[in-house]
Amino acid sequence: MKLIRLAGALLCMAFAFAAHATDFIVSSPAFSPNGILKDAQVLHGFGCSGQNISPALMWKGEPQGTRSFAITVYDPDAPTGSGWWHWVVFDIPASVHNVVEGAGTVDSKALPATAIQARTDFGTHAYGGPCPSAGDKAHRYVFTVYALKVAHIEVPTDASAAMIGYVIHGNTLGSTSIQAGYQR
């Protein structure tokens, strides 16, 4: 009987944790989930003529104990064998629950003072918008916000997005993603 009660209690705790985990959500006024990115978010370069403006993102419902946030924008469809990192930002304070449109500029003035933009696959420390090859299938762009158990992650100044992702994943309490597509 004690074993049945223990199993029941553990099952209830698992459901409570799962329900809490789904409370962490991210959204953007720039695009709807599974929608299409607009020219404002598209890269200006590599043959694309967008405005290269990072979209506004808002999130809420992070796990208890969150000490900072990180944001990544990743294209799993890039023909590189390893995808393409379009934006990596970390050390966003736990009190911050959004980034404004255009926050991903090289000068980072619209990001919180502690936030750090890492090197993307474009080689810059700023947002780089979508620019898939002309005629290629629509690419998916995954915008993910990570709730981290640390206030600061330790990585070299010019660390790759993959290295930062490794450290982010090792400190993640929860994450939430929104995806949009783009094709030219």
Image (cartoon, rainbow, N blue to C red):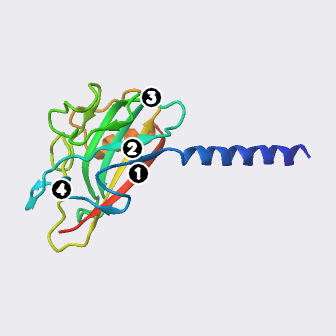
Mark 2 belongs to which amino acid? Val
Circle 3 crowding by C-alpha within 10 Å: few under 14, some 14–19, many from 20: some
- Between discs 4 and 2, the one toward the N terminus: 4
- Between discs 1 and 4, the one toward the N terminus: 4
Q: Going 19% across and 30% down the picture, which residue do you hit?
A: 109
Viewer-side residue, 75 vs 138: 138
- Between discs 4 and 3, the one toward the N terminus: 4
Asked if labels 1 and 2 touch by Cβ distance under 8 angstroms, the answer is yes
Q: Which residue bears the numbered disc 1?
A: 177
SS for tag 3?
loop
Disc 4 from disc 2: Cα separation: 20 Å
Q: Which residue bears the numbered disc 3?
A: 67
Residue 90 at x, y percent in the picture: 32, 35
Q: Which residue bears the numbered disc 2?
A: 145
Disc 3 from disc 1: Cα separation: 19 Å
Viewer-side residue, 34 vs 120: 34
Q: Going 28% across and 42% down the picture, which residue do you hit?
A: 88
Q: Which residue bears the numbered disc 4?
A: 42
**Is residue 52 toward the left or the right of residue 174 in the image?**
left
Disc 1 from disc 4: Cα separation: 19 Å
Q: Say if 150 sits above or below 19 in the image.
A: above
